[in-house]
């Protein structure tokens, strides 16, 4: 009697198809997976929506099957842990999390499971990794040969130069120091060269292989407009481009968040406020609503967003300028994770520049070196905002990537005209110089513009600034136009705002060449006024409607099936206490609706349907599809 042949282990490609329901790897995923499966360290930079999770989830399964034990995933957010573990359970993968929401009994039971080698992935926050109890648990697993891999998600948080520095991430250097033979993979969506080098040094990844994907998100349309009446501009943008669709609006202060959320609600939109000043249970409730309900707009500070996996966010709007390009890229990247068209829209003005400079310069905890780096990062974002070239080219260039004009951003769709603003710039710079020379002190933007425009205000008369040679020489431009000129001179490094002296204006060395007539100054014609968010070519029909584009090819029967499938999915998601997209993504439902399956065999091969989901939901999906309306 012959013995049965042992079942060969599943390959990464087998797992991709059978567990996660995808037929092919994307971009560098396969190379990353194979490298980590073999026990190599890796640093992975991949844009939001690029499939970073699979880069450690598949190696975790392969290595667990080979007897290496559990993969520990360091994740910064409890809500993200919950949803990722839920998604893995849906796919048939044994996973769990350890965090502060659990009782002592639950934590103890989970630790016993780990020591029995019953889990493939364990999620934990960086704070917990450094506790004596967790160190002891990891040590016990290591002694038993059951510690397979460390995956450090949102790894940019380790760097002080990054946009979301979290001190607790610094303790993660202990992973390499304590368990040097356990491979590590660090992942992030955003890091410039300085942040990347800091990540390598802090996490001891000098010998790790780097995998850097393209930062390009071609489905996102970047638009930056001059701020006139920001809330009205926002409302017009949402109503004309994204009525009834999910989005995120970022504001700098908690007060502003509350005001904008109230304004959107008053306008009839489904909107909520989210910021660190709210009770944690209320924040959790609102985050759950955003993930689970369709068409919800979240108005938030940067306290919201990291790890948000909602795929159908159709727009991200900024009513206040972020601190740097990394923050801007990370936040805008939360739109269009499903690959369908999405918008990144920002309104910014002179006050944004003043506020951000003040926050950098008045930071008491920061060193001068740190402040200088942050000023450089802010300058790069200002340059992006004022650039007349393709937004995507400018954005990718910041991350060291060359590209061609995209044809999809605001500057490509309606190229801004530039004008020779040398004379206007000389008037502005000369006025700043004359005022300081006459009074021995500097003054703010509003006062300088009053002098330029010849307004004999009480303050102007009090300081005899109506006697200056620059009084009234700029009467040909309106105040809003002068603000545009000044903003661009600040962006070009000719003027600085001094937060230590009541936001007064001071000349920088680069202004000298302009005053001497040695260089010309070319500025966006937009600074001359007019409707800041009006675009040539903004004709009827240019609305970015991802839902319409995606469903345009479906016939009436398929559309009706899709509606029934979405209703069914919503019921299942509520029962499982998970976001709907964890059950099936919209793209999977559309493919099912289009195929009109008559048997489970018809469902095989549809992207997003793995073996476990086919077993769990196949018959129900068929019932929904074959039920007559």
Image (cartoon, helix red, strand yellow):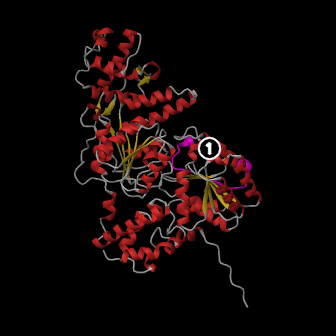
In the rendered structure, which segment of residues is drawn in magenta?
Answer: 176-203
Q: Where is residue 448 in the image (x, y as percent from the top left)?
A: 33, 19
Q: In the depicted view, which residue is nearer to us: 50 or 523?
A: 50
x, y percentage for residue 265? Answer: 32, 45
Up the image or down, 248 lies above or below 82; here it is above
Residue beneath disc 1: 169
The foreground one among 462 and 528 is 462
Q: Position of residue 235 (x, y in %)?
A: 30, 43
Looking at the rendered structure, the secondary structure element under dot 1 is: helix
Task: Please give the name of the residue rendered at 56% of the width and 40% of the height, measured from the top-left corner.
Answer: 165
**Residue at image point 44% right, 61% down:** 580
Q: Can residue 284 be seen in this view?
A: yes
| 498 in relation to 83, above or below | above
Residue at 46% over, 34% down: 378
Q: Quadrant of the N terminus?
A: bottom right
Instruction: Say which residue appears at 41% left-offset and 31% top-offset.
Output: 353
């Amino acid at each position: 009697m012959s013995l049965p042949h042992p079942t060969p282990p599943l390959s990464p490609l087998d797992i991709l198809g059978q567990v996660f329901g995808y037929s092919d790897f994307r971009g560098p995923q396969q190379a990353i997976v194979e490298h980590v499966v073999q026990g190599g360290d890796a640093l992975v930079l991949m844009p939001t929506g690029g499939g970073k999770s699979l880069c450690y989830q598949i190696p975790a399964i392969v290595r667990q099957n080979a007897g290496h034990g559990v993969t520990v995933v360091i994740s910064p957010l409890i809500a993200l842990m919950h949803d990722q573990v839920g998604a893995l359970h849906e796919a048939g993968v044994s996973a769990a999390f350890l965090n502060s929401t659990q009782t002592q009994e639950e934590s103890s039971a989970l630790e016993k499971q780990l020591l029995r080698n019953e889990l493939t992935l364990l999620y934990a926050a960086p704070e917990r990794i450094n506790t004596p109890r967790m160190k002891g648990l990891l040590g016990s697993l290591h002694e038993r040969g059951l510690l397979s891999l460390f995956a450090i998600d949102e790894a940019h948080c380790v760097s002080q130069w990054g946009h979301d520095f979290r001190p607790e991430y610094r303790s993660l250097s202990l992973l390499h120091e304590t368990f040097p033979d356990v491979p590590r993979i660090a992942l992030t969506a955003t890091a410039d060269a300085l942040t990347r080098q800091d990540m390598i040094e802090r996490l001891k990844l000098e010998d790790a292989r780097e995998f850097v994907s393209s930062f390009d998100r071609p489905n996102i349309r970047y638009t930056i407009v001059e701020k006139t009446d920001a809330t009205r501009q926002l409302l017009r943008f949402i109503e004309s481009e994204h009525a009834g669709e999910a989005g995120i609006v970022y504001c700098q202060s908690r007060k502003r968040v509350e005001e904008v959320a109230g304004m959107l609600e008053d306008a009839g939109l489904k909107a909520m406020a989210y910021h660190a000043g709210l009770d944690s249970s209320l924040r959790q409730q609102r985050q759950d609503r955003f993930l689970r309900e369709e068409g919800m707009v979240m108005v938030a500070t940067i306290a919201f967003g990291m790890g948000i996996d909602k795929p159908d966010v159709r727009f991200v709007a900024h009513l206040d300028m972020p601190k740097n390009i990394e923050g801007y890229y990370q936040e805008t990247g939360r739109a269009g994770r499903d690959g369908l068209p999405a918008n990144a829209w920002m309104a910014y003005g002179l006050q944004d520049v003043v506020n951000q400079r003040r926050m950098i310069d008045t930071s008491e905890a920061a060193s001068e070196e740190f402040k200088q780096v942050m000023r450089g990062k802010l300058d790069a974002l200002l340059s992006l905002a004022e650039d007349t070239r393709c937004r995507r080219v400018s954005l990718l260039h910041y991350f060291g990537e060359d590209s061609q004009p995209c044809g999809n951003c605001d500057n490509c769709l309606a190229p801004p005209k530039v004008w020779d603003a040398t004379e206007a710039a000389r008037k502005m710079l000369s006025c700043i110089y004359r005022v300081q020379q006459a009074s021995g002190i500097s003054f703010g933007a509003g006062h300088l513009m009053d002098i330029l425009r010849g307004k004999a205000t009480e303050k102007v008369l009090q300081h005899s600034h109506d006697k200056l040679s620059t009084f009234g020489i700029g009467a040909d431009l309106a105040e809003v136009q002068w603000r545009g000129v000044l903003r661009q001179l600040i962006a070009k490094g000719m003027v600085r705002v001094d937060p230590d002296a009541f936001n007064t204006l001071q000349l920088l060395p680069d202004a000298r060449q302009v005053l001497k007539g040695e260089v010309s100054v070319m500025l966006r014609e937009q600074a001359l006024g007019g409707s800041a968010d009006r675009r040539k070519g903004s004709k009827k029909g240019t609305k970015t409607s991802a839902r319409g584009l995606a469903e345009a090819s479906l016939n009436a029967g398929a559309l009706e099936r899709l509606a029934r499938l979405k209703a069914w999915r919503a019921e299942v998601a509520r029962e499982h206490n998970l976001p709907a997209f964890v059950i099936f993504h919209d793209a999977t439902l559309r493919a099912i609706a289009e195929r009109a399956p008559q048997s489970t065999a018809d469902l095989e091969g549809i992207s997003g349907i793995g073996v476990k989901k086919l077993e769990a939901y196949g018959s129900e999906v068929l019932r929904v599809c074959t039920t007559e309306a």
